[in-house]
Amino acid sequence: MTDQVKYVLDEKDIPETWYNVIADLPEPPHGVLHPATGQPITPDDLATIFPPALIEQEVSDLREIEIPGPVRELYRQWRPSPLFRARRWEKTLNTPARIYYKYEGVSPAGSHKPNTAIPQAYYNKTAGIKKLATETGAGQWGSSLAIACSAFDLECLVFMVKVSSEQKPYRKALMQSFGAEVVPSPSQRTQSGRDILAKDPDCTGSLGIAISEAVEVAAASPDTNYALGSVLNHVCLHQTVIGLECMKQFEMAGDSPDVICACTGGGSNFAGMAFPYLGQNLRGESNTRVVAVEPAACPTLTKGAFAYDYGDTAHLTPMVKMHTLGSSFIPPGFHSGGLRYHGMGPLVSQLLDLQAFEATSVHQLEIFESGVEFAKAELILPAPEANHAVAAARREAIRCREEGVGQTILFNLCGHGHFDMQAYTDYFAGKLKDYEYPAEEIAMALSGLPSVG
Ligand SMILES: *Cc1c(COP(=O)(O)O)cnc(C)c1O
């Protein structure tokens, strides 16, 4: 078929293994340090909050790691996800480029996040854990973990950034539908929450604070563990089903990407799409261009330091070497595009440091303009986060038009926007402004980075 728009694989084509990029790195990952002692962390330190299988995956250098049967069984509910050729959008853009997008919005939570929520719940269940504690910002991760916990009959406690829990009541109801308990953060439930509220009773919360609360709860109880929806190596690993499926779908299409775009918050959907391709590049088998795109209001990769930092505000998490804006970073309230985390996955950070890919930033008016244009052509309304990837793909398509080259562009449409209509409402009402995180603020936040010998 010459005008095909959708490339669909069979259930049997769901990958049997995840791809671990650590196997192809030219040098081993930087060590993870204990938050109190600054010494390298031991598996025992992590065992209070993570199950053994995930700790093993965090440090494994095996290239392929088997996806357990019960996880593949649940993946079948929505995987393999479709790869689309954006034929109608190509016409809108009047570009000679061929644009493809992998659509992760078909999952039960509407994003890529269940790809890791399901295995995380599975490994905790098999380790005898009864309950998972986590944080959520916009609610995508909380919903995904609530669904996964329900599937494996685990309890789920979600600390939801307070401003989001007020602005996004539907996400909260979705989590509750699957039996999760949702607590606005900062809360009185934890010492970390109480400390913040004592200083600032009106604090609207941040991901860094909510992580502190969830880790504190998990560390205090032997049958409760902690789950993180991005950043960590095992999360990036689980997401590689995205890129691995793309490779098979491009074989069906008889094409291959020249450039790949994905948005970055903590880096997991980017890793999921890009790591299998970056692995090919690192092994010298290909030379695919890869572009990470982030908000100008939270410019972790483009303006942050590559340094050891904490993952949370209360400094309960280990220190990892990553691109960071400092753990005290709180993004401006009027920023609507998501992707607000102060740090970045260590593997994504290390690969950027090796110049294995490019990073760029976009302003929020451009992302919503791109997203609405894309929706009118392709009939799918993207999540604001995904709009960053849409905007980057659009820039590439326009470049192809200007240069008169017919390249193949692939981007990750990591979620739909059906729970994010307030952001679109604000955009249509003209309430969104472009905002560049000021250099002085960045310098100030970075001056507080921990000093590591
Ligand atoms: C959570 C989320 C992101 C950001 O997280 P990453 O780990 O960087 O992928 C991006 N897009 C969507 C739709 C999300 O839900």
Image: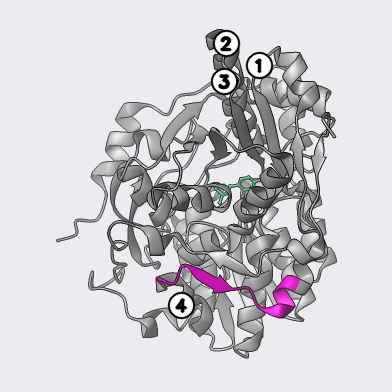
Give me the disc on residue 395: 3
Q: Which secondary structure, mark 3? A: helix
Cα distance between the residues tagged 1 and 2: 7 Å
- Counting from the top left corner in percent of width and height, residue 305 is at 29, 42
Check disc 4 and give the amino acid type: Ile
Place of residue 179 in the rendered image (x, y in percent of width and height, measured from the top left): 80, 71
Q: On residue 404, which mark appears?
A: 2
Image depth: mark 4 or mark 2 in front: 2
Whole-angstrom CA distance, mark 4 to mark 1, is 46 Å
Residue placed at 64% from the left, 72% from the top? 119
The amino acid pointed to by label 2 is Gly
Q: Contact (CB < 8 A) between labels 3 and 4?
A: no
| Distance between mark 2 and mark 3 Cα atoms | 14 Å
Q: Is residue 327 visible?
A: no
When the figure is inspected, residue 256 is found, relative to residue 277, above or below; the finding is above
Q: What residue is rendered at 52% in x and 26% in y?
A: 362
Tell me if label 1 and label 2 are in contact, CB under 8 Å. Answer: yes
Would residue 107 be visible to someone looking at this image? yes
Looking at the image, which is closer to me, 248 or 141? Answer: 248
Q: Is residue 364 above or below residue 383?
A: above
Q: Residue 224 at what x, y percent from top left?
A: 59, 82
Secondary structure at numbered mark 1? loop
Q: Nearer the viewer, residue 383 or 277?
A: 277
Q: Is residue 409 magenta?
A: no
**Residue at numbered disc 1:** 96
Q: Secondary structure at mark 4?
A: helix
